[in-house]
Image: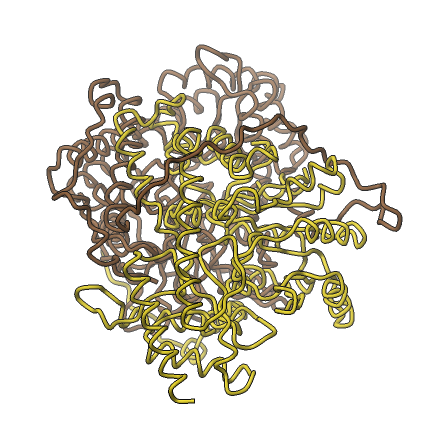
Amino acid sequence: MAIKPLTQPSSASSAAISLSKIAVSNTHGEDSPYFAGWKAYDENPYDESSNPSGVIQMGLAENQVSFDLLEKYLEKNSSDPTSSGRVSSFRENALFQDYHGLLSFRKAMASFMEQIRGGRAKFDPERIVITAGATAANELLTFILADPGDALLVPTPYYPGFDRDLRWRTGVHIVPIHCDSSNAFEITPSALDSAYSDAESRGLRVRGVLITNPSNPLGATVKRAVLEHVLDFGALKNIHLVSDEIYSGSAFSDREFVSIAEVLEARGGRGSERCHIVYSLSKDLGLPGFRVGTIYSYNDAVVTTARRMSSFTLISSQTQQLLATMLSDEEFTAGYIETNRERLRRRYRMIVDELGRAGIECLKGNAGLFCWMNLSPFLKDETVEEELALWECILREVKLNISPGVSCHCAEPGWFRVCFANMSEQTLQVALARIHDFVERRRGNQ
Amino acid sequence: MTQTPPNDESRPTRTGMRLIVPLQGVVQGRGGILLGSLIPCALFYFLQFYLKRNRSPPPPNPPPSRSASSSDLPRSSSRPNLLSRGASNGRVQLSARANHVAKANESPYYIGLDRVREDAYDELTNPDGVIQLGLAENRLSLDLIEERLSKNLADLMSGAGGPPGLRGIATYQPFDGLLEFKMAMADFMTEAMGNEVSFDPLKMVLTSGGTPALEILSFCLADPGNAFLVPAPYYPGFDRDLKWRTGVELIPVHCRSCDNFALSTTALEQAFNQARKRGQKVRGILISNPSNPVGNMLNPYDILDFARERNIHIISDEIFAGSTYGNEKFVSMAEIVDSEDAFKDRVHIVYGLSKDLCIPGFRVGVIYSFNENVLKASKKLTRFSSVSTPTQQILAPMLSDKRFIQEYINTNRQRIRSMYDLVVSGLKELGLECTESSGGLYCWVDMSKLISPYNEKGELDLWDKLLNTAKINVTPGSACHCIEPGWFRFCFTTLRVNEVPLVMERIRKVVEICKPSV
């Protein structure tokens, strides 16, 4: 091939080229301490034998406690992994890029979601929209429910990733619904009203409320009465309600988790066209790499629109097929859900009891992969600066990466999210021992 | 973000790994079903391996008790809330963006695809159904992929080559793709694009298909209200991928039949200047090369010179690069960008496995950029559209198999060429000429003599006849923003050879109806 000589660059081309505002902004919020701690971990990760003094990762909400159950299932079923239904041929699968998603997969997801709720709500596979993870589901819903410059109300403290997922590309604002420890961080009617007024006074149009149930970072389920009130509020203002139920399978007891789906059914579906549920298999099944998320909407227009927009975030057909098989095995899923719950409850008890012995209180939790720890007694002053100083100290000296409440937009300084399900019990014990020693030293110094 | 695998407790107590051989799969031996069950087996195998690396030792299991049996609850309906006093009686609103998307399927491109979905031709079960010629999908060489993956999986199962070649899978996956998979993709891209340039895995961000790759670049390179120049006719999906959620505009740069639809620099300059007069900021030029729907090769030097003069970005969608069959040679943007050239910061390539490798269902796309900041932003943005890990694991060994890929690319080319020749000559017999194309999975057909009046309405009338009378789905030029009426895109790689006569017969009927009387 003949090489064509390049033309002389003009002065215009030597100027740096600019990127979009989105590309250069830090609206994604990934510069917060929540993400900075990960860097410290990456540079010096704990390993029981090779690096016992490394940083223990307690900032990652991932579920590793039930891998063995998945393993057992595979061993039992590998000889005929497709026994539960018609197998798509390779050809069909390779070509399948229909944004409706595999029907067998949607049926299996609907059934799994029903099992998690103890059968107290029914899910229609036709209302399931597939996305590559809950991150994508939350963003997609935001694109559909709100225009740039509009606002979503989100109770604090909330998952730090929401700053990115709900705001970055969408141009939508998050207006916080402030919750505090006086009532275990529950959403109160007055907090909801305040947030709405706050948005109005800023000239922002509120399009919806987004709650996480069970809550991240609180590790607690939302009470039925609160759900009822939020639904009524939504009806009054004619705004949407998004319920991110990604930790629904990680509630320690089936009885304590109430899904918005149940409340809607009890109301005979009244107001349901405002409601949308987000789910994913990353937490309950511990498979974040598979990129499996769903939007479940009771609103036909939302389902249609979300489906079309899901072209940007489809799940690999092979992954859909694999999971369709696994999740439609109801005997397996029932056993898995039950056992997973039990193990998480054990872990939670272990960490809370140990922390209690060290004189540290946690919020009373009943779900999730983390506990919400109160270190405010250890702050010199109840300020964000002191909280960050304490966080830095815990990261550098105690070598634990935990998430400071400020990164979750918590109104009260001194609270920290501590994840307990992404490590072995032994590692957890090491971490707890370190905390114990740290507290002893602090007490000694006071 | 990656994590090293957890500590020693996570390794199983028994030595080595038990290999589960999927007996059913091995015994059945029938092509599709074999792989259909082998691939889930392989995924299970990978899942086992992945789990073994990461699990904690199992605590004592309490006997699992059954959860409450599901009672048959009434399904919730979506009745509007008319009951509470003080409640608003209006239906809840969606965003303006959503309302726009809800209307999206008015394009003939999408209407046609929907029609096929509802009434797809099948030789046995639905011989009067609509034959699909409106989807640029390659089914001609799927058997080769199937065979290779099958062999790959069989090797894995038998333990030959050891455990999966990918390094220990971290619990937390990097959203922009496993490095091992990027390396495999780099190998594949190098082969597919003729071995003229070596692709660098570190310049890649993986996405769940070409669609999100285009959208992410649009978000990174332009602000709402800005524009990209696009040679027209262009792929209808660009209107969705680059505009829907970004607020970015596309300005068509019209190409004409007298130039064989080649892109003229004059037209480019005119379009750029007119945009400037309107106060519209052009941030870049989007090209598809080989082009869709025409199947031309573009001269990347012309594009580079133009973009350099005006200091704008280049997005080069090269998704059909491996599907070339003509006399012209494909030249990637990557080939002509000098590593020393400061201008390389403006060059971004989109690629994927949906076309060249026939596997759109697997959702694998690539953003390839020379710009560090674009890569940084894209890495964060691909969280919303990342590639499934098991899919990466399955495909990596095949993509790195140079010999297989070479043979595959060559055979695939030949098959596309044969089908192109068959279809083009068949159309010629009907009096329909096609442009001379060199790449892609379609031909660009001149049906202007059959339309009346000679405008978009006439074209859509013909499209309607083809869809509803002849029962074939083809894409009219107006859906592709073609300035000359009467051109249609016929995708031919979804056809079997024995279906071609049937297609021609159906077209003949419409040609007879529409032929101008002598």
Foreground of the two, B243 or B95: B95
- Residue at the farthest right position: B85
Tell me the yellow chain.
Answer: A
- Residue at the farthest top position: B124
Answer whether residue B327 is visible to the viewer in this image. yes
Q: Position of residue A35 (x, y in %)?
A: 42, 69
- Residue at the farthest bottom position: A446
When asked about the image quadrant of residue B272, the answer is: bottom right
Q: How many marks?
A: 0
Image quadrant where one finds the C terminus of chain A: bottom left
Answer whether residue B278 is visible to the viewer in this image. no
Q: Position of residue B494 (x, y in %)?
A: 41, 27
Q: Position of residue B252 (x, y in %)?
A: 56, 53
Foreground of the two, A382 or B438: A382
Foreground of the two, B30 or A195: A195
Q: What shade does chain B have?
A: brown
Applied colour scheme: by chain
Query: Residue at 42% across / 32% down in the picture?
Result: A324
Foreground of the two, B256 or B316: B316
In the image, residue A208 sits, relative to residue B38, either above or below, namely below
Query: Residue at 67% across / 30% down in the picture?
Result: B75
When asked about the image quadrant of residue A281, the answer is: top left
In the image, residue B455 sits, relative to residue A220, either above or below, namely above
Q: Position of residue B134 (x, y in %)?
A: 50, 31
In the image, residue B474 sits, relative to residue A56, either above or below, namely above
Q: Is residue A416 left or right of residue B319?
A: right
Image quadrant where one finds the N terminus of chain A: bottom left
